[in-house]
Amino acid sequence: MMNSRRVFPAFILVLTIIDASLAFDYSEAVDKSLLFFEAQRSGKLPGTQRVKWRGDSGLYDGYQQKVNLVGGYYDAGDHVKFGLPMAYSVTMLSWGAIEYGRNMMDLNQMGHVLNAIKWGTDYFIKAHSQPNVLWGQVGDGDSDHYCWERAEDMTTPRTAYKLDTEHPGSDLAGETAAAMAAAAIAFRPYNSSYSDLLLVHAKQGTFHGLNAVCKRVLYIIGLLGKMNCCGRQHGCIEQPKTFSWDNKYAASMGGTGWAVKEFSWDNKYAGVQILLSKVLIDGDGGAYTATLKQYQAKADYFACACNQKNAGYNAPLTPGGLLYLHEWNNMQYAASAAFLLVVYSDYLSAAKSVLKCPHANVQPQELLMFAKSQACLDLIKADYILGKNPKSMSYMVGYGQNYPIHVHHRGASIASISVLHSVVGCVQGFDAWYRRPEASPNVVHGGLVGGPDKNDNFEDDRSSYEQTEPTLSGTAPLVGLFSKLHSINSHYAAGPTPTKGQSNSCE
Ligand SMILES: *[C@@H]1O[C@H](CO)[C@@H](O)[C@H](O)[C@H]1NC(C)=O
């Protein structure tokens, strides 16, 4: 294994060159995925809005509740502003910007990425209307789903839900705080006063009126990122403080004991496990080394399972090679796993470390795969998203020649308010637009739809919402992922030999 490594780079390089004719344009994928966030905007649209088929909407959100909740993002093909997936999406955009900001700048996309983050965080700031109050949702699923109308025509109730000292919700509060903390890091080099403002909200969100244990677990996601960003030499976070909870709560909260199989807005353990592994990989474990090793064992479990290198459970794949975990919006799990594996691969390769997977024949653990090859494996998964699949279909809307044209998305499926000025009513939308066999009049560029079933089949039909609905949470990891993949491609295109020690090569 060790010896064969010497010949591997040249082999991969040849493969890459051969593959170049089939190579996907990741820069276009980054560009499109950011457009999706503009299509999902709620509130008053700015003059810089590029998705022109959208108009202002939700301008009275919070009015009834006497709080300004205008802004933020619609979750998917509907018009509910769900706090938890929105916060997760902002976290993922921010994490992507923290890891791959340089690549985003090379692509001239950093401004758009920051705008996408800020559209979410400006809303979170409003939603965090008092230190102990967080508005967690506007609109409700049942009544929203009763209508098929454009956001600009919305007639459904804009019920708003809040967390406060009588209505605790540490998961949502922690997630929102983590999103603001992560965004604070992403913004730090570009606008330090906005970054400071986000940190104030993140800290209040985590330390007031919440379950004491949960808030700390979630907050650490942001804190660790901050530590990475500022560097410990700047003293922005004192490590012992950050970790003072660790040994006490790590096991009882499940972080060290729970081997997870998916990473999503609903379960972020794999992300925590990989972030905490970085501390260990970087040699900063100190007194917490034993606990961190337990985290890393779980991070390895996740990565090995995705790559089919676990001794027991391996992540299920479709015959075409797509990670397949759920019938409903499965693609989001493939996208988030691809992001995590690329990040983990970078952490490992930066430290010249390796991923340790159990041997398939249950022999003692050995090094089966170098972390860098993870990124190469991931290339395949990401390419599945963009069209390297049995249907030759891009599951990112508007990318390439062949993509879903009956997307389960109210706004996309009805003529734009700028074209059709008259109101399209709640039920009228179903009759006149939802059931229409033609392609949707608007292309909701960049949205990652739910994707194919377990046999790689895909029904491009608005009523197959499990397959054709695009979501914020599915699309968010793609921004960082494709920025990174683009840099790998450019790296090979630019030089004859991959540089040793470069974390983004696949040798
Ligand atoms: C920084 O953010 C603040 C707060 O949102 C904003 O008012 C200001 O214009 C921003 N500064 C720059 C240079 O973008």
Image (tube, helix red, strand yellow):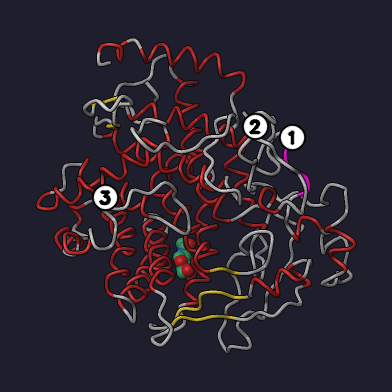
Kind of element beneath mark 3 = helix
Q: Residue at x 40, y 55 (%)?
A: 268
Which comes before the other along the chain, label 2 or label 1? 2
**Of the residues shown, which amino acid type is indicated by label 1?**
Asn
For label 2, being within 8 Å of ligand 1 is answered: no
**Residue 92 placement (x, y as % from top left):** 46, 53
* Neighbour tally class for label 3: few under 14, some 14-19, many 20 plus, Cα within 10 Å: many
Q: Nearer the viewer, residue 197 or 207?
A: 207
Q: Give me the C-alpha separation between circle 1 and circle 3.
A: 40 Å
Q: Position of residue 82 (x, y in %)?
A: 56, 68
Where's the N terminus, which quadrant? Answer: top left
- Up-down relation of residue 44 to residue 112 (above or below): below
Rendered location of residue 357, percent (x, y): 30, 32
Residue that carries the numbered disc 2 in the rendered image? 387
Which residue lies under the disc numbered 1?
402
Compared across the picture, whether 279 is left or right of 133 comes to left
Most common SS among magenta residues: loop
- Part of the protein shown in magenta: 401-406
The reply to whether dot 2 and dot 1 touch (C-beta < 8 Å) is yes
Label 1: state its secondary structure.
Answer: loop
User: In the figure, 216 relative to 95: above or below?
Assistant: below
Marks 2/3: CA–CA distance: 34 Å
Q: Earlier in the sequence, mark 2 or mark 3?
A: 3
The Cα atoms of the two marked residues, 2 and 1, are separated by 8 Å
Do labels 2 and 3 touch, CB within 8 Å? no
